[in-house]
Image (spheres, rainbow, N blue to C red):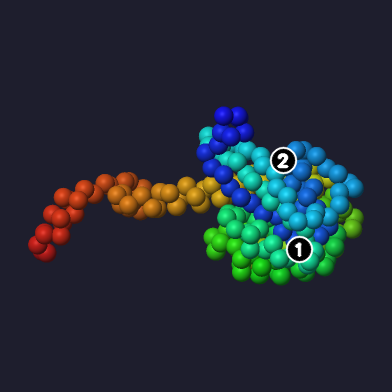
């Protein structure tokens, strides 16, 4: 088994947003530490993987990227299937890409799992002098829609690592919590102690007389 095959969790994360906001460069910066100024619009779908460590567990991220153009929207349902996280990306220097975030969010809600973890990403933060979307506006939108929020630059690599680390850690925490919650033979009181209830004990409790 190669080192790349050794992992504790495999999480599928999708990149969505308008064409040209830098989704492909976010993917290549995180997975290969590469940036291509001449990168063309993605046609169809591509994905890349990278593993990180959270709480001594190896998390393998399978990150999917697709074109933002309307003509590729037929792949929608297959693209979102199995995704546990999504980075909803806009360009801080192009207000129209931020305006379209609402539509992308609706598409996510319509096609992805209800519990998908979503992060709003304002990309191209290196273009501060051309900023068209105030950080506070995006922060407020994220809060109102229960999304996490970060600004990144795939060009100078700022916050790219942090964005993926944060969303993968959040997904891992949720998955870990669910695993604990579905442990059927353990009752977890609010003080955090675990009490194991045996079947005999349950029967005895049922048969007990009320005071």
Q: Position of residue 2 (x, y in %)?
A: 60, 29
* Residue toward you, 70 or 126: 70
Q: Quadrant of the C terminus?
A: bottom left
38 sits to left or right of 100: right
Residue count near mark 2 (Cα–Cα under 10 Å), binned few <14, some 14–19, many ≥20: some
Q: Residue at x 71, y 69 (%)?
A: 102
Instruction: Give the left or right position of residue 93, taking residue 150 as reference.
Output: right
Residue 210 vs 124, above or below: the answer is below
Residue 144 seen anywhere in this rendered image of the structure: no
SS for dot 2 = helix
Rendered residue at 38%/53% (across/down): 182
Give the label, 2 or 1, closer to the camera. 1
Residue at 70%, 47% in the rendered image: 47
Mark 2 near mark 1, Cβ–Cβ under 8 Å?
no
Q: Quadrant of residue 108?
A: bottom right
> In what quadrant of the picture does the N terminus appear?
top right
Which numbered disc covers residue 129?
Answer: none
Judging by the rendered image, the residue that carries numbered circle 1 is: 72
Query: How far apart, in angstroms, are the residues tagged by discs 2 and 1?
Result: 24 Å
18, 138: nearer the viewer: 18
SS label for mark 1: helix
**Nearest the eye: 157 or 199:** 199
Picture coordinates of residue 57, whole percent (x, y)? 53, 37
Residue 68 is situated, as x and y percent measured from the top left of the image, at 77, 61
- Image-quadrant location for residue 14: bottom right
- How many numbered markers are drawn? 2
């Amino acid at each position: 088994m190669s080192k790349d095959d050794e992992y504790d969790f495999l999480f599928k994360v999708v990149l969505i947003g308008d064409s040209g906001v830098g989704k492909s460069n976010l993917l290549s910066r995180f997975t290969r530490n590469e940036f291509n100024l001449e990168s063309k619009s993605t046609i169809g779908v591509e994905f890349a993987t990278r593993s990180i460590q959270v709480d001594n567990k190896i998390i393998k991220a399978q990150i999917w990227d697709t074109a933002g153009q309307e003509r590729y929207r037929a792949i929608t349902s297959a693209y979102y299937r199995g995704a546990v996280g999504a980075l909803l990306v806009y360009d801080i220097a192009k207000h129209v890409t931020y305006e379209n975030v609402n539509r992308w969010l609706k598409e996510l809600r319509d096609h992805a799992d209800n519990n998908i973890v979503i992060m709003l990403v304002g990309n191209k933060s290196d273009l501060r002098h051309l900023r068209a979307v105030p950080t506070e506006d995006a922060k407020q939108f994220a809060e109102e829609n229960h999304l996490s929020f970060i600004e990144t630059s795939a060009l100078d690599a700022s916050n790219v690592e942090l964005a993926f680390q944060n969303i993968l850690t959040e997904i891992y925490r949720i998955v870990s919590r669910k695993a604990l919650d579905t442990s059927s033979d353990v009752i977890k009181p609010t003080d955090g102690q675990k009490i194991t209830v045996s079947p005999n004990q349950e029967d005895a409790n049922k048969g007990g007389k009320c005071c």
